[in-house]
């Protein structure tokens, strides 16, 4: 996972996949692919789930407050004219037979906890074209459309959270949602507003 975190995948219980693309985007806009993929994932999961899927900035899928999936997009920009992007997506479909580890039981969930028999094939067949369509929206220059949809699934806005900056500083505050560039806004106790580009963001209860 991001920042060296561990991702546990249990045999037969989830969908774990990578999509390799060469998007027609400038280098400074490649990070937008994570938000676009989040929209595609949320809208796909909404087809099956009885509860509304939500997104925790920048890359987590939640159902009923439980993390059920994640996204990790990595790029190779050595060829700046045609950068390579690998979109990694993991979604818990079923609870593993052996159960989640002790440290995951409170936070983790699976799609079929709130859906009726969605299979990995079902999710895969709907998710791949949804991701490709979302990236096409970016390529067409319509990032604001992606942001509009992403905000409909925003789990982070209004929540108390902490941000561990790349420099190791801890900032605690309230999330004010995302900017028109897809960055996160946090207002701390002193009233200072921070714009988050990278680092680790945790909800207060995480």
Image (tube, rainbow, N blue to C red):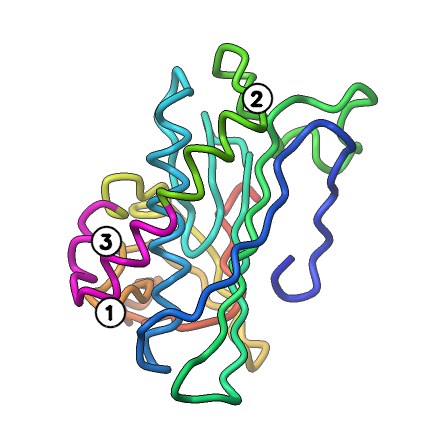
**Chain-order first, disc 1 or disc 2:** 2
SS under mark 1: loop
Up-down: is 47 above or below 192? above
For residue 27, which quarter of the picture? Answer: bottom left
Q: In the rendered image, which quarter contains the C terminus?
A: top right
State the mark number for residue 146: 3
Give the residue at mark 2.
119
For image coordinates 32% across by 58% down, the residue present is 135
Residue 85, percent across and down?
Answer: 49, 69
Kindly give the residue lying farthest to the top in the view shown.
116
- Disc 1 to disc 3, C-alpha distance: 11 Å
Q: Which residues are magenta?
A: 131-149
State left or right for residue 203 relative to residue 91: left
Do the residues under discs 1 and 2 have CB atoms within 8 angstroms?
no
Q: Nearer the viewer, mark 1 or mark 2?
A: 2
Residue 161 vs residue 147, the one in the foreground: 147
Please check the rendered image and state whether residue 137 is part of the magenta-colored stretch, yes or no.
yes
Mark 1, other Cα within 10 Å: few <14 / some 14–19 / many ≥20? few
State left or right for residue 199 relative to residue 148: right
Give the residue at mark 1.
181
Kindly give the residue lying farthest to the right in the view shown.
98
Residue 79 vs residue 44, the one in the foreground: 79
Residue 16, percent across and down?
Answer: 63, 43
Mark 3, other Cα within 10 Å: few <14 / some 14–19 / many ≥20? many
- Disc 1 to disc 2, C-alpha distance: 35 Å
What secondary structure characterizes most of the magenta part? helix
For image coordinates 53% across by 89% down, the residue present is 78
Q: Nearer the viewer, mark 1 or mark 3?
A: 3
């Amino acid at each position: 996972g991001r920042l060296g975190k561990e991702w546990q995948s249990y045999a037969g219980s989830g969908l774990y996949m990578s999509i390799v693309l060469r998007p027609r985007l400038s280098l400074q806009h490649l990070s937008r692919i994570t938000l676009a993929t989040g929209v595609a994932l949320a809208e796909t999961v909404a087809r099956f789930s009885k509860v509304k899927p939500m997104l925790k900035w920048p890359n987590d899928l939640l159902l009923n407050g439980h993390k059920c999936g994640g996204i990790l997009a990595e790029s190779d920009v050595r060829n700046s004219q045609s950068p390579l992007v690998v979109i990694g997506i993991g979604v818990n479909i079923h609870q593993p037979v052996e159960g989640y580890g002790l440290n995951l039981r409170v936070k983790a969930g699976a799609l079929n906890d709130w859906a009726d028999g969605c299979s990995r094939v079902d999710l895969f067949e709907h998710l791949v074209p949804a991701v490709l369509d979302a990236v096409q929206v970016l390529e067409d220059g319509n990032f604001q459309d992606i942001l509009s949809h992403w905000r409909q699934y925003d789990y982070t806005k209004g929540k108390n959270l902490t941000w561990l900056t790349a420099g190791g500083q801890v900032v605690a505050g309230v999330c004010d949602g995302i900017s028109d560039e897809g960055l996160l806004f946090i207002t701390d106790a002193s009233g200072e507003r921070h714009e988050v580009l990278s680092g680790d963001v945790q909800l207060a209860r995480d």
